[in-house]
Image: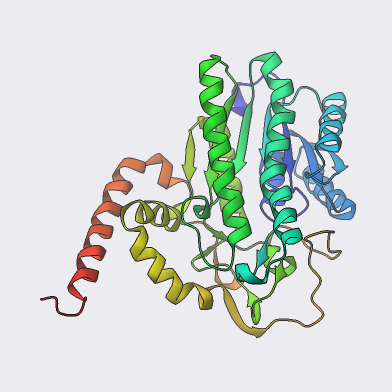
Amino acid sequence: MASRRTRPQVVVITGAGAGVGRATARAFARRGARIGLVGRDAARLRQAQEDVHRLGGSAVAYPCDVADAVRLDAAADAFEASLGPIDVWINNAMATIFSPVHEITPAEFRRATEVTYLGTVHGTMTALRRMRARNRGTIVQVGSALSYRAIPLQAPYCGAKFAIRGFTDALRCELLHQRSRVRLTMVQMPALNTPQFEWARNRMPHRPQPVPPIFQPEVAARAIVWAVDHHRREVYVGMPTLLAIWGNKLAPGLLDRYLARTCYGAQQTREPAAVDHHDNLFAPVPGPYAAHGRFSACARPGGLGVAGSIHRFALAAAVLGVAAAGVAGARRLKPGSR
């Protein structure tokens, strides 16, 4: 933990200009960390850098697209030259498309995968090149409940998060085989109030929204900090994440039908999609975006937080009970059942 360290942690965060990355930079800044900020928009990175300095940390900003492995490695060199050896690397950058699969082009699928999945692979490999030589360090993959339970209209994002989980599990086994002290953790997030719903590419008839209940990005940031300190294999953030993951283990077919019926509407507001909407799939969108999106009025600042990991066995038992009751109820509602 920070209080036991002889020097400030050196933390690299991708996607640091806005959303979860921005909130996480602030959380580590309050601990006095030295932070490497990676993102595509140089202006937002400067704003994030100012946040860090104001809160007591120090920061270096490096504009970079995580899909570019060579440039990301150069960013790591620059951070280590300015801040010191990297202790923590957080893979957070993502890009997504809200659309039925049949309306997504191959180029769009490729780009979303390059940023969200391959960007995580590139960041992990960049961190490993430095951490394995020192036999220490922590790599955090910012995941999602959607890495276990996919939903309609977000196939590129869900596919990438599933892939990140598979990649991370495989790598963890390799590190265990090598008796490496480099640690891997994946933090599975609930719906969050971030700007991605403003700038994601959208082919739905209405403006996108997170599937309620919605949490503020500071909930995610606290979970990431907690994961770094506690070295858990996985962290489930909030009861909705726990319910989605365990519910899918128990009754995936039931969830398929439920999501097919409800999840189209749950991901859209009543506002029509903007005709002149600009998205960030291939280039950043300028504007005064920070950690929060436009759903603060209905977003929760806390809740169970990381309780899904701290008390995971008791909560898992509770979820099993709820899911079993739901399955039994569904069976009773079938035609001809008594």
Residue 264 in view (yes/no): yes
Residue 129 image offset from top left, x and y in percent: 73, 22
Q: Residue at x 82, y 64 (%)?
A: 288
Image check: 189 left or right of 9?
A: left
Residue sticking out furthest to the left = 338
Q: Quadrant of residue 331?
A: bottom left
Residue 134 image offset from top left, x and y in percent: 69, 14
Q: Quadrant of residue 222?
A: top right
Residue 28 image offset from top left, x and y in percent: 68, 39
- Can you say which quadrant of the picture contains the N terminus? top right
Above/below status of 270 relative to 100: below
Above/below status of 59 relative to 326: above
Q: Residue at x 77, y 60 (%)?
A: 281
- Closest to the observer, 115 or 51: 115
Q: Residue at x 85, y 27 (%)?
A: 77
Above/below status of 50 relative to 325: above
Q: Quadrant of residue 325?
A: bottom left
Q: Residue at x 79, y 48 (%)?
A: 51
Residue 335 image offset from top left, x and y in percent: 19, 80
Residue 9 in view (yes/no): no
Image check: 36 left or right of 166?
A: right
- Closest to the observer, 327 or 83: 327
- Can you say which quadrant of the picture contains the C terminus? bottom left
